[in-house]
Image (cartoon, rainbow, N blue to C red):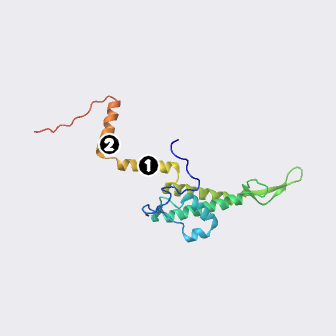
Amino acid sequence: MRGRKPQQGAARRGASDSYAMSRPEEVRGVAMPPDVMADPVQSEIWAWVAPPVNRFTEQDVPNLRLLVYWHAVAAQARQALHSDDGTVRIFDKIGVKPFKTEDGRSIPLVRKNPALQVMKEASAEIRALSDMLGLSPLARSRIGLMDAATVKTAADTAAMFRSIDAAYELPEVVVEDAED
C-alpha cells in the first residue's frame, strides 16, 4: 500500500456535493393513494406491489387499487378459514342430521365454508390483475418479448432469418426484377 494511512475522522472527497451538481434521487412511478394509506392491510400490500420507486403510471392506479383490494379480501378469507386450534375449516356445521350412528352419536350436517369461494374468486382476480400489470413472471417475460420485438429493425429481422437459413443450409433467395 502506498501513501500514508488515512485519518479516522477525516472528511472524504466526494462525500458531499459542495457544488450542488448532482441530481437528487428521482421518485418514479405512482404514490400510494390516501385511502389505501388509511387501511393498514392495503397499505402494506401496496408497499410490496408498488414500492416508492416503481414503473407504474397513473393509468395503472385503478388496477393497482383493485389488486390491493383483492389481496386484502383473500387475506380476510384465509383468516376466516383458520380455526383457533390451527386447523383449516373447510366445512361449516349447519345442523345435525335427523338420525344417529349405531353407537348413538349424532351426525353433523355440514356445508362447504363460504370463505373458500371468496378466496377462489379473489385469487382469480389477483392472477388476472397481476398479469395485466406485469407482476407475474410469465407476464414479465411476455412484456420483455414485446419490448424486444418492437425494438428490432427490418435489418435485424432479415439478419435473423439469414442466420436461420444458414443453420439449415438453405440457399439465400435472391429476387430479381423481371422486365417484360
Give coordinates of residue 165: x percent, y percent: 32, 33
For residue 79, above or below residue 138:
below
Give coordinates of residue 136: x percent, y percent: 53, 51
Q: Quick one: which residue is furthest to the top in this view? A: 169
Which quadrant would the C terminus be assigned to in this image? top left
The residue pinned by badge 1 equals 144
Query: Which picture quadrant has residue 176?
Result: top left
Q: Is residue 40 left or right of residue 28?
A: right
Instruction: Say which of 9 and 72 sits in front.
Output: 9
All told, the count of numbered labels is 2
Q: Amino acid at mark 2?
A: Thr
Q: Determine crowd level at label 1: few under 14, some 14-19, many 20+ residues with C-alpha closer than 10 A.
A: few
Q: Quick one: which residue is furthest to the right in this view? A: 103
Instruction: Tell me which numbered mark, 1 or 2, is placed earlier along the sequence.
Output: 1
Query: Which picture quadrant has residue 122?
Result: bottom right
Give coordinates of residue 73: x percent, y percent: 63, 62
The residue pinned by badge 2 equals 157
Q: Amino acid at mark 1?
A: Gly
Give coordinates of residue 59: x percent, y percent: 45, 64
Circle 2: element type: helix
Circle 1: element type: helix
Q: Residue at x 55, y 63 (%)?
A: 66
Instruction: Say which of 10 and 57 sits in front.
Output: 10
Alpha carbon distance from label 1 to label 2: 17 Å
Q: Residue at x 52, y 49 (%)?
A: 137
Q: Is residue 138 left or right of residue 173?
A: right
